[in-house]
């Protein structure tokens, strides 16, 4: 899947690479990369400054459509430094309402390309979640992700209802947690605990009962996370 360029996307990416490129700090870049276990190179732009620069990049430009979002996101993912992927995540978060159900395929590509918790969690809660809420038929896609063998899609499926609160489909959440309870990877076990802990803010009795009934299946890490505030 290669980005199909749109005029707005070309302008955004041109501005972005010029503005961000000029603001890089090589010393800070080394520190930021080390914090992320040297998974990716960084320009060395701290988060508050990134947001200010993003406003500069987008100043005076029109609102994007789905094709613009797709092109910019894939273009940012093709660039090496991590700050470009952060820009794309934030832009998608702001404009996800214009996307059709089919955009989930683009998001799946982003989640599974250069994956780490920083982008995956943002996309799961703030892009996948709103897409599924707006297009309920995508719940079946989440079922597929949750039951699959791709680590980061599993995590995204578990976390996609993180902001749903009273709208959470508790049965689906608990089913995903049970289905992956014995997953060997830290990031899945942590995601299960996080999702349960967040839902406990809405329905603590339901989470308490679920953990009690499934403690023998859940990892100690998951249980600790789930009941941390109960």
Image (cartoon, helix red, strand yellow):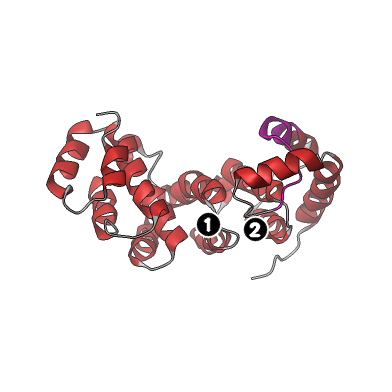
Q: CA distance from mark 2 to mark 1?
A: 11 Å
Label drawn at residue 100: 1
The secondary element bearing badge 2 is classed as: helix
Q: Which residues are magenta?
A: 41-52
Q: Residue 141 in the image: x percent, y percent?
A: 39, 63
Q: Of 209 and 69, which appears nearest the observer?
A: 209
What residue is disc 2 on? 70
Quadrant containing the N terminus is bottom right
Q: Residue 166 in the image: x percent, y percent?
A: 30, 35
Q: Residue 16 in the image: x percent, y percent?
A: 79, 46
Frontmost of labels 2 and 1 is 2
Q: Of 39 and 111, which appears nearest the observer?
A: 39
Q: Residue at x 19, y 43 (%)?
A: 211
Q: Relative to 81, is 1 on the left or the right?
A: left
Q: Is residue 62 visible?
A: no
Q: Is residue 51 magenta?
A: yes
Q: Alpha-carbon neighbours of circle 1 within 10 Å: few (<14), some, or many (≥20)?
A: few
Instruction: Looking at this view, name the residue that lies furthest to the bottom.
Output: 1
């Amino acid at each position: 899947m290669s980005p199909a360029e749109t005029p707005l996307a070309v302008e955004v990416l041109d501005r972005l690479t010029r503005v961000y490129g000029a603001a890089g700090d090589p010393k800070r870049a080394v520190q930021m990369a080390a914090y992320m276990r040297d998974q990716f190179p960084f320009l060395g732009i701290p988060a508050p400054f990134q947001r200010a620069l993003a406003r500069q990049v987008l100043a005076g430009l029109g609102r994007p459509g789905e094709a613009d979002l797709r092109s910019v996101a894939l273009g940012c993912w093709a660039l090496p430094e991590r700050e470009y992927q952060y820009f794309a995540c934030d832009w998608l978060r702001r404009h996800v309402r214009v996307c059709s159900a089919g955009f989930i395929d683009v998001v799946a590509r982003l989640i599974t390309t250069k994956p780490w918790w920083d982008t995956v969690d943002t996309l799961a809660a703030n892009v996948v979640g709103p897409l599924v809420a707006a297009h309920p038929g995508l719940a079946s896609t989440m079922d597929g992700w949750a039951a699959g063998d791709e680590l980061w899609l599993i995590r995204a499926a578990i976390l996609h209802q993180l902001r749903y609160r009273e709208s959470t489909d508790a049965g689906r959440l608990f089913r995903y947690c049970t289905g992956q309870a014995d997953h060997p990877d830290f990031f899945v076990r942590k995601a299960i605990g996080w999702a349960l802990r967040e839902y406990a803010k809405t329905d603590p009795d339901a989470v308490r009962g679920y953990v009690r009934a499934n403690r023998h299946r859940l990892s100690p890490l998951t249980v600790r996370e789930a009941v941390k505030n109960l």
